[in-house]
Amino acid sequence: MVLRDGRTISALTVGAAVAVLAGLAPATAVAAEGSAETYGKQQLRWERCDFDGTAKLECAKVEVPLDYADPGGRTIDIAVSRVKAGNAAKRHGVLLMNPGGPGGSGLAMPVEIEPVLSAEVRDRFDLIGFDPRGVGRSSPIGCGLTEDEMTVHHPYSDATFPKDVARARSVADKCWAKSGDLLPHITTRNTARDMDAIRAALGERRISYLGHSYGTYLGAVYTQMFPRRADRFVLDSSLDPALAWRGAFRGWSEGAELAFTRWTEWAAARNATYGLGATAAEVRSGFWELVARADRTPIPVGGELLTGDAIRLRYEDFYRVETVTPWVVALKTAAAGGPAGAAAPAAAAVPASASEVPADNPLAVAWAVFCGDTRSWPRDPEQYRRDAIRDRATRPLAGDIAANIQPCAFWKSAAREPVTVVDNDVNALIVQNQWDPKTTLAMAQGMRRALHGARLVTVAGGEGHGVVVVGPSCADAPVNRYLTTGRLPAKDLTCGGAAGGAGGR
């Protein structure tokens, strides 16, 4: 994610399938809570972080059980970081943070997020980052994947589906061969338990929290498991807990169709500038003609030759109308024999959190969580084939891409714990852009339904993945007020520009 000053937070953001969130069986809950208090008695050794350029960020390690059902067994270390509250007299407590993923490193978050928080908030909280289990400096895992195996999204076709199946199986097999001793324990629920162990180790009765993308799901799980220990929770760009995880993959294509329709209307209203069509129908028709032409004769773009499927793989770009429109114009020009088009808008790079971390670490953790959290993934490859064909018929931009087969079809271990729906009255503030390509507005509304005590602030016309963490936006005031005072808005709010506007982020 890109911060206000242009720096980036390393996060791999993804989204949530038809199973429900897992909670704790009563016996497991008691064991987990007892473990947190037992491991909370450790003395943390804070040292300056060697990867940080400022003296204010310090790091330590919290020891936790690998398996919370066996608290006396093998342990792992969770790397944590801290920037102390600016005013000891005003200090309220700790604000834990998660950048997303799953698989995103959070150690640098305190110094990355500090500039986007108000002075009042910085005075009141120690800002606490951490690498979740399996990530970065917290017992990192890897799968030894090839470059091709690290590509998540693949358009469906009858010709390539056997290769897609073989790739998904290979990823699952490699992950279990290389990290099988850790994979069953890298789940959202165990990371939530680690958060509670961090709370206990810091000597805090409760924690406050700022989670982005996948971090909102993690925060919701924590409020379900440890409701009395949740203080002020801000969920930025939320997933719907009821969709974890296959449902979220398929949900991306639903959001993409809405964004694509909005783009056709936006471009048609500016036909004098872009020449893509005087009506939304003309813009839509012209785009699909361009895709069909690229499938026959790939279009030169940024030193590459783009097929129609390659163009569709950029479906997230349609959420940013002012950015994607010149690119489509350039594609059209190149397809007609004009100058080669410019490269598509580039995604932010994800820097490694430490040199010894495997290159595929973020993706390895993502699959561990996606596949191990729920039982929502079909085991029969033919189900993915049917879903991909069906979804493309109704959502042609990306339906097949989002529904195609993934490694979870061949994962050796499904969710190990009973599942419950996230359903509680814990206070939380959910903030959401109207046009978010990764966690759609519909997903945030699903999170709002799951957290009855929450409030939702929607940035009308807001584009991009991230509100507080990117900003500035009209959501800043209610967020800072809530973190400072603990008071939520009286009702859900919508702020910002017109719903059809560009929103600009």
Image (tube, helix red, strand yellow):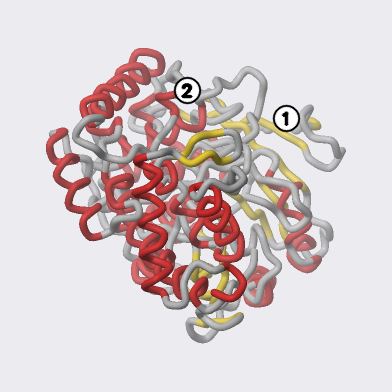
Q: Amino acid at mark 1?
A: Arg
Q: Earlier in the sequence, mark 1 or mark 2?
A: 1
Is residue 254 visible from the viewing direction of this image?
A: yes
Closer to the camera, 190 or 448? Answer: 448
Q: Is residue 411 left or right of residue 339?
A: left
Q: Is residue 140 left or right of residue 496?
A: left
Q: Residue at x 36, y 57 (%)?
A: 288
Q: Residue at x 38, y 52 (%)?
A: 225
Closer to the camera, 56 or 264? Answer: 264
Question: Which quadrant of the structure image shows residue 185?
Answer: top left
- Depth-wise, is mark 1 or mark 2 nearer the camera? 2
The residue pinned by badge 2 equals 147
Residue 255 placement (x, y as % from top left)? 38, 62
Is residue 413 visible from the viewing direction of this image?
A: no
Q: Amino acid at mark 2?
A: Glu
Relative height, residue 125 to residue 445 (above, below): above
Secondary structure beneath disc 2? loop
Q: Is residue 274 left or right of residue 385?
A: right
Residue 356 placement (x, y as % from top left)? 63, 17
Q: Is residue 319 left or right of residue 9?
A: left
The residue pinned by badge 1 equals 45
Residue 433 placement (x, y as % from top left)? 53, 68
